[in-house]
């Protein structure tokens, strides 16, 4: 499955890779690329929008990974972009492994085959692996493994296992901090399950917490030393809230207010510095939300609908800018329906495991409902939705999974 998935993604790259990747505008507004270039040119972790110095706008893991690619192939060269896309395709293909194992251990071999091959040919898995030089595919792989890891820990009280889980959660948070919306809850559910089974849980909980904090601490300490405040991984939430809540509802986000697209915003960012700029954007967003509560509630509902269906508008002007929305709506909505049907069946078969899926599906997108969504924000959850979709499609449990479930209950 991994080999086929990788071959498909690599084969797609030449079709979706555009020469405009080398257009100066694209490269100058590729935040991970700008930060990686700053690192390899000796200016440190910074300059996400312009040459403004050190920054905490993005998390460090993928930034340094991309910097390593730039070190080998040159900063933002055609070869480095293709290398980044190939690496992301590998991350996406490797996600077949936790998808298959999770489905097999939870629902049986038949569901595992559907889920594994489903992810191998997943439109979102293929596209974001082949055409998206961002951290999305790495976060997707990490979340899938950590979901499986947290579930398996119900059968382990070994300190080593919990230290490893906590450290891996720390790495995932340094890749994309939104994972902190679900990973501690998955761990807490495991502690609850251990408690219910009268197994030791306090020691494992402390071990996991210490390991996670140990991994996160150097980055948090770096940010505190540079910016003199506590910054939990990245500093940009004020801007994200601001560009999603400005009164413009023609799209899910008003990109014209972003420093990448606004000379006025970029000038303010350069003039006052990153932290003061983000504070100002946060205050502007809060002021607007307080003065327009009905609009905010309405937009929050639209954002929820968009995250789960891909639908925003059928207005002709909108579709002219987003021509792929109709097929995306079909794929997104279909996967949502199948995923929810699979979740219902999972609760009927193994409610503690199903609760893990429900935790991720509910909490992972929560912050995006209130700030703003993007099409790729929900993608790290896709492998779990593929597993649930396979549960919905594959039908009744096979004998091996039924016996396994009966054995675990005994």
Image: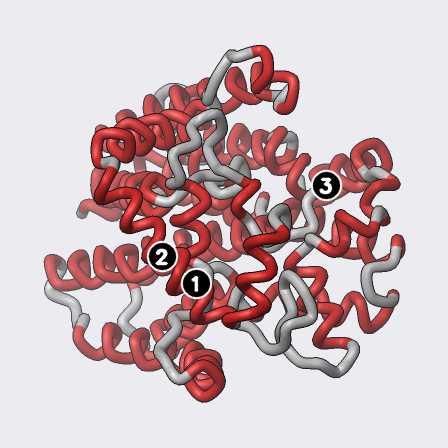
- Depth check: give the residue in front, 280 or 394: 280
Q: Is residue 265 above or below residue 355?
A: below
Instruction: From the viewer's perspective, tell me whether residue 354 is left or right of residue 378.
Output: left
Between disc 3 and disc 2, whose residue precedes? 3
Secondary structure of the residue carrying numbered label 1: helix
Secondary structure of the residue carrying numbered label 3: helix
Instruction: From the viewer's perspective, tell me whether residue 183 is left or right of residue 267.
Output: left
Q: x, y (%) of residue 312? A: 46, 22
Q: x, y (%) of residue 290? A: 22, 44
**Disc 3 to disc 1, how far (Cα)?**
29 Å
Asked if the residue under mark 1 is in contact with the one under mark 3, i.e. CB atoms within 8 Å, the reply is: no
**Disc 2 to disc 1, how far (Cα)?**
6 Å
Q: Please tell me the numbered disc located at residue 131.
A: 3
Instruction: From the viewer's perspective, tell me whether residue 324 is left or right of residue 291.
Output: right
Q: What crowding class fits label 3: few (fewer than 14 Cα within 10 Å), some (14-19), or many (20 or more)? A: many
Q: Please tell me the numbered disc located at residue 282.
A: 2
Residue that mark 1 sits on: 278
Q: x, y (%) of residue 124? A: 60, 33
């Amino acid at each position: 499955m991994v080999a086929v998935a990788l071959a498909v993604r690599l084969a797609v790259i030449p079709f979706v890779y555009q020469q405009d990747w080398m257009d100066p505008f694209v490269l100058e507004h590729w935040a991970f690329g700008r930060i990686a270039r700053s690192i390899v040119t000796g200016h440190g972790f910074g300059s996400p929008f312009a040459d403004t110095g050190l920054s905490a706008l993005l998390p460090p893991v993928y930034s340094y990974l991309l910097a390593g690619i730039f070190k080998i192939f040159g900063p933002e060269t055609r070869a480095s972009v293709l290398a980044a896309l190939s690496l992301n395709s590998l991350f996406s293909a490797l996600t077949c492994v936790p998808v298959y194992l999770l489905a097999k251990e939870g629902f049986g071999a038949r569901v595992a085959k559907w889920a594994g091959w489903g992810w191998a040919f997943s439109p979102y898995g293929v596209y974001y692996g082949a055409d998206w030089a961002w951290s999305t595919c790495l976060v997707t792989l990490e979340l899938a493994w950590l979901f499986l890891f947290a579930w398996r820990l119900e059968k382990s009280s070994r300190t080593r296992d919990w230290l490893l889980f906590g450290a891996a959660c720390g790495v995932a948070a340094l890749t994309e901090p939104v994972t902190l919306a679900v990973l501690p809850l998955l761990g807490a559910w495991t502690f609850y399950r251990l408690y219910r089974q009268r197994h030791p849980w306090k020691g494992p909980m402390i071990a996991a917490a210490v390991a996670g904090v140990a991994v996160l601490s150097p980055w948090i300490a770096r940010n505190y030393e540079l910016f003199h405040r506590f910054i939990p991984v990245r500093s940009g939430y004020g801007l994200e809230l601001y560009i999603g809540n400005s009164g413009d509802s023609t799209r899910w986000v008003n990109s014209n207010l972003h420093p990448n697209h606004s000379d006025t915003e970029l000038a303010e960012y350069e003039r006052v510095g990153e932290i003061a700029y983000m504070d100002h954007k946060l205050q502007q967003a809060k002021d607007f939300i307080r003065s327009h509560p009905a609009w905010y509630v309405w937009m929050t509902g639209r954002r929820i609908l968009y995250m789960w269906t891909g639908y925003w508008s059928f207005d002709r002007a909108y579709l002219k800018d987003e021509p792929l929305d109709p097929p995306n709506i079909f794929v997104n909505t279909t996967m949502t329906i199948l995923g929810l049907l699979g979740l219902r069946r999972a609760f009927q078969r193994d409610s503690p495991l199903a609760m893990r899926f429900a935790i991720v599906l509910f909490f992972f997108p929560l912050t995006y409902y209130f700030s703003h969504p993007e099409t790729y924000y929900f993608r790290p959850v896709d492998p779990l939705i593929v597993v649930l979709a396979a549960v919905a499609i594959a039908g009744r449990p096979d004998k091996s999974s039924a016996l396994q479930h009966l054995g675990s209950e005994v």
